[in-house]
């Protein structure tokens, strides 16, 4: 069963209304678009699987499979583990359905750590970081909409990107659409001050969740990464165990560079989850497995477009099927 938004979040379940099942039509629509967006990778993998599994399973066949998975951005270490397991399983069970077993291994490879978001705090603080152009602002708006409209939670958004006025305006529009409170500052203000004010306002007004945006930055910009650390320290002065979730937005079309981004952001601010965006026709998709397998950071959300319904909780089984099944 495809994961729903209510499956992504851990709540106390006491103060908020229960949410009914999500319409099946909406889930199927997303899966159809995901399959279409991953068609190029699926067709390449399918052709190689047919060639590999229909002939002799010799070293050359396994090497071809490795090359195909690496080309799909699965990453060399993760690919090596998957192919080694599949080769062992094939030797132990000659009648094994290797295509189905590979799908299981890909799904297993995409699972790691806690893949839910814990909102059992008062308030829960979500910090969102990432490189410019990865869809960070729109992802925040969509998350806020679902928290407000599907889980019945009270949300405040803090516009911590004080360098780009367009980002603040875009986020404010999403805030109005979602029905959340909004805290902003003058352009060029200290991002840490925005985070401080947002949490103070959330405490005073009794909000359930605070989502704090940050300015987009390259993972190679040391002074801006230090600024992120400062924002985190400011948050912890008000709530020692916060932020309770730090989400990093990664553009899936950047491939292995996305893995490098995840590595450096994780070192700076202890990233707890990935929002994998732009899984469009040019993205190969395997980066979800590379990040999970090599960094141990779970992908929690995936985005396949600009519309509200194009961001959803990540489901490893659905993702593996979209990559493999015709």
Image (cartoon, rainbow, N blue to C red):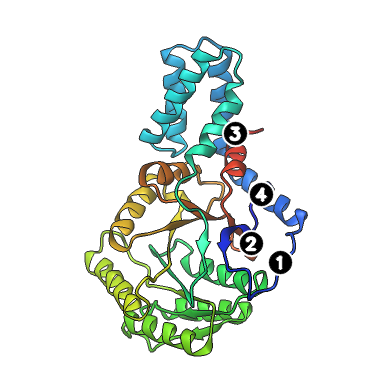
Q: Which mark is residue 19?
A: 1
Secondary structure of residue under mark 4: loop
Question: In the rendered view, would you say 42 is above or below 176?
Answer: above
Query: What is the spatial separation of the Cα atoms under label 2 and label 1, in whole angstroms?
Result: 7 Å
Q: Residue furthest top?
A: 56
Mark 2: which secondary structure?
helix
Q: CA distance from mark 3 to mark 4?
A: 17 Å
Q: Image point 54% across, 51% down: which residue?
A: 279
Q: Which residue is label 3 attached to?
A: 324
- Neighbourhood count class around disc 1 (C-alpha, 10 Å): few under 14, some 14–19, many 20 upward: few
Q: Earlier in the sequence, mark 3 or mark 2?
A: 2
Badge 4: residue crowd in 10 Å (few <14, some 14–19, many ≥20): some
Mark 2 vs 1: CB contact within 8 A: yes
Residue at (43% x, 81% y) in the render: 165
Cα distance in 3D space between marks 4 and 2:
11 Å
Distance between mark 1 and mark 3 Cα atoms: 32 Å
Between 65 and 268, the residue placed more toward the observer is 268
Q: Earlier in the sequence, mark 2 or mark 1?
A: 2
- The C terminus is located in which quarter? top right
**Residue contact between numbered discs 3 and 4, judged by CB atoms under 8 Å:** no
Q: Which residue is mark 4?
A: 2
Do the residues under discs 1 and 3 have CB atoms within 8 angstroms?
A: no
Picture quadrant of residue 236:
bottom left
Q: Which mark is residue 223?
A: none
Viewer-closest of 89 and 53 = 89
- Residue 153 x %, y %: 61, 75
Mark with earlier residue (1, 3): 1
How far is mark 3 from mark 2, CA to CA?
Answer: 27 Å
């Amino acid at each position: 069963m495809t994961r729903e938004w209510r499956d992504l979040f851990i709540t106390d379940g006491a103060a908020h209304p229960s949410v009914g099942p999500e319409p099946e039509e909406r889930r199927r629509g997303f899966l159809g678009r995901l399959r279409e967006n991953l068609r190029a990778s699926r067709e390449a993998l399918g052709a190689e699987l047919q060639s590999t599994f229909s002939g002799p399973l010799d070293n050359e066949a396994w090497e071809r499979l490795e090359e195909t998975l690496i080309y799909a951005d699965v990453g060399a270490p993760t690919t090596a583990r998957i192919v080694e397991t599949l080769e062992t399983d094939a030797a132990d069970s000659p009648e094994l359905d290797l295509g189905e077993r590979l799908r299981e291994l890909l799904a297993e490879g995409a699972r790691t750590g806690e893949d839910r978001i814990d909102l059992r705090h008062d308030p829960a603080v979500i910090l969102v970081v990432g490189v410019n152009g990865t869809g960070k602002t729109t992802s925040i708006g969509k998350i806020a909409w679902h928290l407000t409209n599907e889980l019945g939670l009270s949300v405040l958004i803090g516009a911590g990107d004080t360098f780009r006025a367009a980002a603040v305006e875009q986020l404010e529009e999403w805030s109005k659409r979602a029905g959340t409170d909004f805290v902003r500052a003058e352009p060029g203000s200290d991002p840490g001050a925005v985070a401080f004010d947002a949490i103070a306002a959330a405490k005073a007004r009794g909000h359930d969740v605070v989502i704090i945006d940050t300015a987009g930055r390259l993972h190679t910009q040391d002074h801006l990464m230090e600024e992120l650390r400062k924002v985190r320290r400011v948050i912890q002065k008000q709530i020692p165990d916060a932020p309770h979730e730090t989400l990093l937005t990664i553009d899936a079309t950047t491939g292995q560079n996305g893995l490098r981004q995840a590595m450096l952001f994780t070192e700076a601010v202890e990233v707890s989850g990935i929002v994998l965006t732009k899984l469009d026709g040019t993205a190969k998709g395997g980066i979800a497995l590379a990040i999970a397998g090599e960094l141990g950071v779970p992908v929690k959300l995936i985005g396949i477009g600009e519309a509200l319904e194009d961001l959803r909780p990540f489901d490893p089984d659905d993702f593996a099927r979209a990559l493999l099944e015709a």
